Image (cartoon, grey):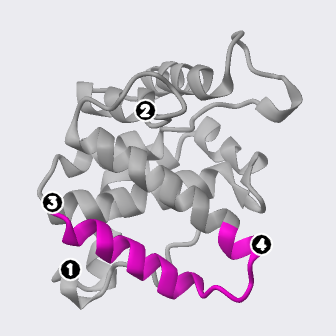
Amino acid sequence: MISLEKPIGSRKNFADSEETLVSEFMELVQDILHIDDVQELRDYVQHCKTTRLQHCVNVAYYTFLISRRLELNVRSATRGALLHDFYLYDWKNNEQPIEGRHSVVHPQVALAMAKQYTQVDSIMEDCILNHMWPMSRQRPQTKEGWVVQGVDKLCAAMEMGTQSVRRVSPVKLKALMVSAIAARY
């Protein structure tokens, strides 16, 4: 089950209640979350025990919070973040449909999948295609793309770290990282 209970970063300093933030977030992404192929992302493990769907929701929610705080294009950034890893194969078992490095291939596949199901604007495209920088050559071209790229790395580190190192408090780590990112802007 996707968890949005007590999301870190949705504290009073973001001006709205958790319920308001989660409601606003869900309005932006619920149509995507109802797509059967998006739900199929539950069948793939992304980082340790985190499913690919949960990872995408994690990245989308923190992108939503940061983009909102920075007054960026919240809708495009959040939707692009949710679709950034929208590919239905296990790259660890050499199942990817295109030859090449996974860090270059899967954003292309995710973008093609996203375009099958929803309108993709240039910001969403940037978020999806360039989230793997610096493991891929192309850097994000938009502020929103940079947010998704950074949040993706942060969520991956937290998902792996909190599942492998029990003594690190995931709540304190997440709050610290989100605050640090938001404070820079």
Circle 2: residue type: Ile
Amino acid under disc 4: Ser
Q: Secondary structure at mark 2?
A: helix
Q: Do the numbered discs 3 and 2 sit on residues whose CB atoms are within 8 Å?
A: no
Residue 128: numbered disc: 2
Reading the chain from its start, which is encountered first: label 3 or label 2? 3
The one nearer the camera, 132 or 44, is 132
In-front residue for pair 97/120: 97
How far apart are the alpha carbons under marks 3 and 2? 20 Å
Q: Is residue 166 magenta?
A: yes
Give the percent coordinates (x, y) of residue 104. Answer: 57, 22
The CA distance from mark 3 to mark 1 is: 11 Å
Task: Name the residue beneath numbered marker 1.
Answer: 14
Amino acid type at mark 1? Phe
Q: In the rendered structure, which amino acid carries the disc numbered 3?
A: Leu
**Mark before the other along the chain sequence, 3 or 1:** 1
Q: Residue at x 74, y 78 (%)?
A: 165
- Which of discs 4 and 3 lies nearer the camera? The answer is 4
